[in-house]
Image (spheres, coloured by chain):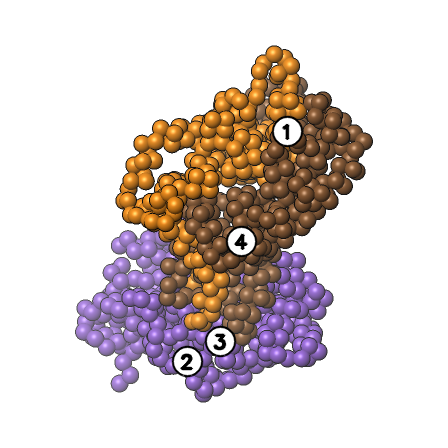
């Protein structure tokens, strides 16, 4: 149980820089999920914390202790791998006890801890089996057990659920969360799955092209995404983006699609005519007889809701999510509620908040 | 496969005939292949006179015991086949085990470490593929004789104990071991030697078994090298010994030769047959 | 081709490579270098003085009609062994592959000649072809067809080819069978639906798909015929009669061991080295290319 601090961690592989200076403070017992598309540097970041990769510059501190130059074994951490990395020739008990054996713990102590851990994660009857005799979910548990048994300061999870089928993934997700809360171990969890990220994390780190695009709680990220990348990445279906320009002395946006909408939460700084990107989530769009005519192209009925894909008169694409059944074709009059708009600078995509003064 | 033909007009009877013909040809093949072996096996149970008269026996005779006893104790040239078999066994086992041990550690070094000269070492090993003992036979013999190893087990074993093929096979296999195993080992605090012993070696068991078959057969069947290096009866292998027995045509005791022949074939044939599954896997993996 | 994750120790890999490198240097590179060096030297009759003669050993070699005969013998022998061993193995493998249940059974029945030493194979074939005690040899003579591989060069060549090919068939069979069994059945079924009959399917589908295996075996069999058959020839004919079955490797041995002509023997070794290097290079270039598509 410990804190983790990353200070300006950078990493280059030859000429390509994959991490451009990441800072992060993880509180004791906190579960941080690092989420991003493949190639964003999330795994590299985790591996730097693990000591499997050396940072080009920057510092890693666990419980305030500098571990930047230490071997993985000396960092007092444990890791759950994507493919579990269970040794195929060892039994479940041997796999779990291997780390303790290397640390020279007495045999009966190892047996005691293996039994206790197996009890905790519910794999007691499987201890004498070999990994190939286990189902995917059971392997996943053994991989967890191997990490837990070490009683480390820090848990690292490298996409541990991505090899499971959808149903099992949901189940194991909840289980990991319960276990982590119960043990209270500081954890870093890497995933590319936004649902996993939202449900598991106390806070999320959304990585994009080697930067931490945003570090915040799941709700904060959903409600106030820091830029268009985060806004588009979190939420399903993805947020719609429409082009517009700042108007009425920063009080409103003039959309390319036609309407001028006054901001509900105050004026944005900047000259009129400045290009903006306006984001609006599909579920926030309302039907309104006086609204824009959306020419429908595709309807995806999902049962409790319907996702409609269409085009606005100016050719921009728009996705709408309606509760209950919706029309299959034709046109649909839609309105964009002012309070649901996210305002970003078209240049660079940063979020523009109302001027405070 | 033959069911696929049935989609057009080949009637079932025709296909059955096809299968019958196939089995017949395969049967003839098997018999033709076994014929030389059968003749030797049967010949080894008759007395010298029967074979000398040229009445090639295709059925067992009554002299099996005495022929094998004579071969085992006296052989043809005074050295008992029992002793030659012992020599062959020592040499074949040492070569097989030694080659596996030396190759597996060098493959481990080349695959699991990054160090200056790694590529050079790899190519040095690779190039030895192109230098079979036959093309450097006399200079190699000179080295062995300068080292005083002529007519010793060491002289028969050490010069042929480095194996590029085995090293390349292990390398190929090591490249398929998931990176996560190494990482998990690092997390657990296992160093390279511990990882080798606890993980890599157990995982390589099948490969080692396959190589053992291939290399045991190779070691047992060597001819040119022992012909030069083992000139004394003390270290004579059974393959060389048996060829020496037929050297003097006129007074060859063919029945003893046949018994020796059977004894000389038995160990490698048994190894191949009993370990067939690994052997086939190892063979097709090594070479492709 | 390289692992991403490795250990960091600096000294250990060198220690692990030490045994292999020591043996390779002392017993492979040094003697191979010597062989090349000796190929440019000539010793006088008493072995006392050695002089550098440049390429003279090589020019002498290729000017020697007997050496040219040896090359011809080797060509005939290697071609014979390779074609025979490949054709028989392919036929048997194709047939065995048809028997879905019997395939591995036949493999067991055909695999064992692999375990037999070339020299022992030769002895087995003596009992078939020996003019007075051999089953076939004697039958031929009784039928009025004079057969004695110890007197007739062509017959001797035939016997060494048969004995050498016999031993190699099982190796080829294993590979052909593995190759055949790895051909996806769907491809053959598609061809059958397209209306191709068995023979046609073999030549248009199976044989092309098997070509990597065939090519690989071609090289392996050539190497086998060049080098590993020394035991067959030494035990059966000792290169005779009248050098009719003397191959390149056998002559290099005789010149070095019996005639003590180290210069010429080394030059012949160098020629053989070039042959192996060419064969290995062809094989690996082909393998590389295969990997890429």
Q: Which residue is mark 4?
A: B150
Badge 4 local density, few (<14 within 10 Å), some, or many (20+)? many
Q: Are marks 1 and 3 in contact (CB under 8 Å)?
A: no
Q: Colour of chain C?
A: orange
Distance CA(mark 1)–CA(mark 3): 75 Å
* Residue furthest out toward the bottom: A64
Residue at point 66%, 61% (across, down): A130
Q: Nearer the viewer, residue B13 or C97?
A: C97
Q: Nearer the viewer, residue A284 or C284?
A: C284
Query: Is residue A150 among what the camera can see?
Result: yes
Q: Which residue is mark 2?
A: A68
Residue B124, above or below A272: above
Distance CA(mark 1)–CA(mark 2): 83 Å
Residue C9, above or below C122: below
* Residue furthest out toward the top: C144
Q: Which residue is mark 3?
A: A72
| In the rendered image, residues at marks 1 and 3 fall on the same chain | no
Task: State which quarter of the image contains the C terminus of chain A.
Answer: bottom left
Residue C173 - label: none
Q: Colour of chain B?
A: brown
**Subunit bearing disc 1:** B
- Give the structural element (helix, strand or loop) at label 4: loop
On the image, the x and y values in percent for residue A264 come to 33, 74
Tell me, by letter, which chain the rendering colours purple: A
Distance CA(mark 2)–CA(mark 3): 10 Å
Distance CA(mark 4)–CA(mark 3): 52 Å
- Give the structural element (helix, strand or loop) at label 1: helix
């Amino acid at each position: 149980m410990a804190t983790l601090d990353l200070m300006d961690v950078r990493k280059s592989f030859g000429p390509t820089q994959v991490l451009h200076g990441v800072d992060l403070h993880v509180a004791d017992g906190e579960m941080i999920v690092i989420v991003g598309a493949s190639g964003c540097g999330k795994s590299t970041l985790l591996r730097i914390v693990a000591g499997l990769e050396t940072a080009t510059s920057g510092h890693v501190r666990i419980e305030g202790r500098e571990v930047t130059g230490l071997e993985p074994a000396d960092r007092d951490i444990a890791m759950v791998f994507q493919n579990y990395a269970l040794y195929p020739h060892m039994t479940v008990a041997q796999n779990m006890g291997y780390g303790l054996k290397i640390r020279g713990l007495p045999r009966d102590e190892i047996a005691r801890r293996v039994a206790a851990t197996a009890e905790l994660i519910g794999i007691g009857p499987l201890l004498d089996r070999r990994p190939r005799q286990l189902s995917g979910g059971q392997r996943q548990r053994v991989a967890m057990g191997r990490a837990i048994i070490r009683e480390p300061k820090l848990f690292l999870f490298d996409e541990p659920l991505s090899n499971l089928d959808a149903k099992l993934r949901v189940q194991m997700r909840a289980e990991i969360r319960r276990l982590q809360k119960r043990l209270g171990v500081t954890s870093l969890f890497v995933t590319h799955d936004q649902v996993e990220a939202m449900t598991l994390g106390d806070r999320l780190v959304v990585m994009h092209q080697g930067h931490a695009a945003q570090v915040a709680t799941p709700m904060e990220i959903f409600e106030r995404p820091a830029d268009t990348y985060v806004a588009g990445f979190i939420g399903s279906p993805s947020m719609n983006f429409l082009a517009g320009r700042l108007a009425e002395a920063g009080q409103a946006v003039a959309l390319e699609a036609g309407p001028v909408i006054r901001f509900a939460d105050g004026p944005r700084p900047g000259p009129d005519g400045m290009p903006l990107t306006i984001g609006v989530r599909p579920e926030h769009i309302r039907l309104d007889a006086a609204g824009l005519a959306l020419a429908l192209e595709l309807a995806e009925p999902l049962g409790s809701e319907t996702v409609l894909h269409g085009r606005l008169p100016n050719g921009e694409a728009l996705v709408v999510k309606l509760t209950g059944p919706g029309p299959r074709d034709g046109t649909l009059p839609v309105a964009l509620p002012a309070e649901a708009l996210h305002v970003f600078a078209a240049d660079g995509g940063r979020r523009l908040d109302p001027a405070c003064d | 496969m033959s069911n696929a033909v049935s989609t057009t007009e080949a009637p079932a009877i025709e296909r059955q005939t096809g299968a019958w013909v196939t089995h017949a040809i395969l049967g003839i093949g098997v018999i033709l292949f076994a014929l030389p072996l059968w003749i030797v096996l049967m010949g080894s149970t008759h007395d010298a006179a029967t074979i000398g008269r040229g009445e090639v026996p295709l059925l067992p005779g009554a002299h099996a015991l005495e022929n094998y006893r004579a071969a085992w104790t006296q052989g043809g040239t005074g050295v008992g086949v029992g002793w030659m078999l012992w020599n062959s066994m020592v040499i074949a086992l040492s070569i097989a085990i030694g080659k596996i041990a030396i190759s597996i550690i060098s493959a481990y070094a080349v695959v699991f470490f990054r160090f200056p000269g790694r590529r050079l070492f790899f190519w040095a090993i690779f190039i030895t593929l192109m230098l079979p003992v036959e093309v450097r036979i006399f200079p190699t013999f000179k080295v062995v004789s300068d080292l005083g190893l002529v007519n010793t087990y060491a002289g028969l074993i050490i010069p042929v104990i480095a194996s590029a093929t085995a090293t390349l096979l292990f390398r190929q296999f090591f490249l398929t071991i998931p990176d996560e195993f190494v990482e998990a080992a690092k997390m657990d605090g296992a160093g390279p030697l511990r990882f080798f012993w606890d993980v890599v070696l157990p995982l390589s068991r099948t490969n080692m078994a396959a190589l053992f078959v291939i290399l045991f057969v190779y070691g047992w069947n060597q001819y040119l090298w022992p012909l030069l290096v083992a000139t004394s009866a003390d270290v004579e292998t059974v393959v060389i010994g048996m060829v020496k027995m037929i050297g003097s045509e006129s007074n060859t005791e063919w029945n003893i030769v046949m018994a020796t022949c059977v004894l000389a074939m038995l160990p490698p044939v048994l190894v191949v047959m009993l370990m067939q599954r690994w052997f086939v896997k190892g063979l097709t993996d090594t070479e492709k | 081709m390289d692992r991403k994750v490795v250990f960091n120790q600096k000294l250990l890999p060198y220690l692990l490579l030490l045994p292999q490198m020591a043996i390779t240097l002392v017993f492979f590179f040094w003697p191979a270098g010597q062989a090349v060096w000796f190929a440019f030297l000539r010793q006088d009759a008493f072995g006392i003085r050695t002089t550098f003669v440049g390429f003279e050993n090589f020019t002498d070699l290729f000017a020697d009609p007997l050496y040219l005969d040896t090359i011809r013998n080797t060509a005939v022998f290697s071609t014979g062994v390779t074609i025979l061993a490949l054709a028989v193995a392919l036929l048997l493998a194709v047939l065995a592959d048809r028997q879905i249940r019997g395939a591995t059974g036949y493999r067991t029945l055909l695999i064992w000649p692999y375990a037999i030493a070339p020299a022992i194979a030769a002895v087995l074939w003596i009992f078939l072809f020996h003019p007075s005690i051999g089953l076939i040899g004697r039958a031929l003579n009784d039928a009025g067809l004079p057969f004695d591989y110890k007197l007739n060069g062509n017959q001797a060549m035939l016997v060494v080819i048969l004995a050498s090919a016999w031993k190699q068939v099982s190796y080829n069979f294993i590979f052909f069978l593995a190759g055949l069994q790895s051909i996806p059945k769907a491809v053959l079924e598609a061809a059958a639906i397209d209306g191709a009959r068995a023979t046609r399917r073999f030549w248009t589908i199976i044989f092309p798909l098997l070509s990597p295996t065939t090519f690989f075996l071609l090289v392996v069999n050539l190497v086998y015929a060049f080098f590993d058959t020394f035991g067959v020839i030494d035990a059966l004919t000792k290169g005779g009669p009248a050098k009719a079955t003397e191959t390149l490797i056998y002559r290099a041995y005789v010149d070095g061991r019996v005639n003590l002509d180290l210069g010429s023997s080394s030059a012949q070794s160098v020629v053989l080295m070039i042959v192996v290097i060419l064969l290995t290079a062809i094989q690996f270039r082909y393998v590389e290319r295969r990997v890429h598509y």
